[in-house]
Amino acid sequence: MSPKLYNSLTRRVEPLETIEPGKVRMYCCGVTVYDNCHLGHARCYIAWDVVRRYLTWRGYEVRYVQNFTDIDDKILNRARKEGSSMEEVAERYTQTYFEDMKRLNVLEADEYPRATHTMDGIKRLIHELESKGYAYASGGDVYYKVRQFSEYGKLSGRKFDEMQAGASGRVESEDAEAQKKKDPFDFALWKGAKSGEPAWDSPWGSGRPGWHIECSAMVRQSLGETIDIHCGGADLIFPHHENEIAQSEAVTGKPLARYWMHNGFVTVNGEKMSKSLGNFTTIRDLLDRVTDPMVVRLLVLMAHYRKPIDFTDEGISAAKNGWNTIKEGLDFGDLHGDQFGWDSEKIRKLPPEDSEAVQQFRAAMDDDFNTPNALAVVFELAKELGRDRNVWIHGVKIETPREVLKQKWLILVSLVEVLGLILPVEARFLVLSAHYRKTIQEGMLFGYEHGSQFGWDFDKIQELPLEDSEAVQQFRAAMDDFNTLNALAVVFELAKELLRDRNIIVHGGKTETPSEVLQQKWQTLVRLAKKLGFINRVPMSATLYGDQSKASLKELKVIGGLTDEEIEEIEKIEGLIQQRLDARKAKNFAEGDRIRNELKDQGVTLIDQKDGTTIWHRIDKD
């Protein structure tokens, strides 16, 4: 039997019958890239990521496309406020989107079309609408004749007397623009150019596309005239998705999508999320509080995708407890499998038995992607393994046969991966210990902090071959056997050795370890750690020691992967330090103390050196 899903168009649960057997064409409305993503985005993209993962697990070949709206009044307004450009704002927040989704383990789409890259398709679609009598030009703009499309309102169920422009926050202006419309319900397909705004040439004059036409053109360009699933937030049903249907189907005479799926709304402590209420929360804000992204992901999946979800401290606490239960079950094989003679990495690649648990999970997910019921199966498996793990670590013999344990663990891993709650193999072991992770990240900073005082040439270091040292041989031996834990232990030991030398240097001492040995250790650490998924960058949120004046900011950006925001923050800190040095030279010690205290309040500690210079480090407040 095929999975069943709720179709917002027909308002009932229907079996999935795809256009091409075994293939799914799926389109998700993406973000307008003018700000960091918020909780509503997390809920939306986790939900559709799970649908995509599950359909793939069920054997479908899924092509998943998600757009970026990179032309919009909100982007232009931010660019004006910052004194930058639409392109700069859009590119910055496109990158932050990818960073946030990676942390939440949301798979990348197969294609990310952008409005600015789809201009020919947009203009073609508008021309076709105009030629068929569904659009008209007026004063440099082009508008859609809403009443011309007899099925308008079939998705939202609204009648004309119930409709109002801007139901999804896109309010058409009611002054000059209203005068250009033949009917108040008509909406813009093309907007004439305004002074100081980006514009493209068109048959109707210079301008830019309206919001709704973008997705119609991108769906057609990337997936065809009719797709299987079109999804997005419930706030997009009207007017955005309603308008997409009107635009696309007026031209093609075919359904735009067989199934329309929409996820429920998000509230924070029972209230609508709003900046005016002070509860507007970005994904980054939440992850800084929660620390483990899988807790956020689990919290989203604990509610059915069509139901509202309330982000509360109690809900986050429940998700933390649930994630700890799942982790204990996963740890059984990762930490103890070798004691039972398992090769946990090879076991992961085996298909699980079609057990009762698998059948229950499939039944839950086939029922309109019922993740709460699917999680009940996962929790039960995890608790059973957790109980056996507790028995084992206390030295008591486990009565459950080893083959049964192995199969339970394999099923748990498989089902958790379907839900996206388990990280890729390269990163999975890195979350086992925050101490391991932090130590390795700090060790990777050693060269950037202190390499210049040893006369290291960063360009040459990057080109040097990795010495076949004892550490490299141990790492290779571990990874040849897919033993990531042993490989992690090698990297951890290298980091600890470097940190011992760093502590001596930071406190004014002289390390006895030769410069060449330190360089080789650091080079080895960086390269091996990257193979385990560590990012070779300088994270401002982690403990950061500052010898940045010696390793230039340009080097840190190119080699260390610093973002522009992090570069700007370092420059501000270095600027204040220089002001303090100038004040001290002028014997204005009160001003020097004021600056020191200001930096201390920001979590920055200064260490004055004997040669009159000052180095700094950031203390991790966590």
Image (tube, grey):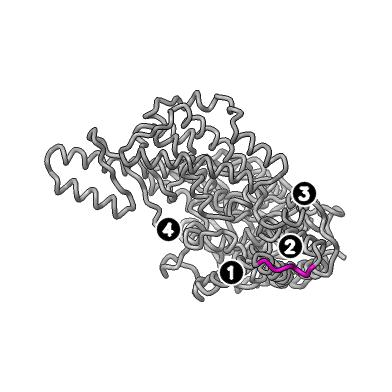
Amino acid tagged 3? Lys
Residue 397 sits inside the magenta stretch:
yes
Mark toward the start of the polypeptide (2 vs 3): 3
Q: What residue do we see at 61% from left, 28% from top?
A: 468
* Residue that mark 3 sits on: 346
Q: Amino acid at mark 4?
A: Asp
Measured Cα–Cα span from mark 4 to mark 1? 21 Å
> Can you tell which of label 2 and label 1 is closer to the viewer?
2
Observer-nearest of 481 and 181: 481
Choose the circle earlier in sequence order: 2 or 4.
2
* Residue on which the image places disc 4: 622
**Mark 1 — residue?**
319
In this view, the residue in front, 42 or 77, is 42
Provide the secondary structure element on which disc 4 rests: loop
* Helix, strand or loop status at disc 1: helix
Badge 2 or badge 1: first in the primary sequence: 1
Q: Residue at x 51, y 76 (%)?
A: 270
Residue hosting label 2: 412
Q: Pointer 3: residues within 10 angstroms few (<14), some, or many (20+)?
A: few
CA distance for labels 2 and 4: 32 Å
Give the image quarter of residue 470. Answer: top right
How packed mark 1 is, by other alpha carbons closer than 10 Å (few <14, some 14-19, many 20 or more), is many
Give the mark nearer the N terminus: 4 vs 3. 3
How dense is the environment of label 2, judged by Cα within 10 Å: few (below 14), some, or many (20 and up)? many
Task: Mark 4: give few (<14), some (14-19) or many (20+) Cα within 10 Å.
Answer: few
Q: Is residue 93 above or below residue 397?
A: above
**Where does residue 113 sit, x and y in percent of width and height?**
64, 45
Q: Tell us which disc is closer to us: 4 or 1.
A: 4
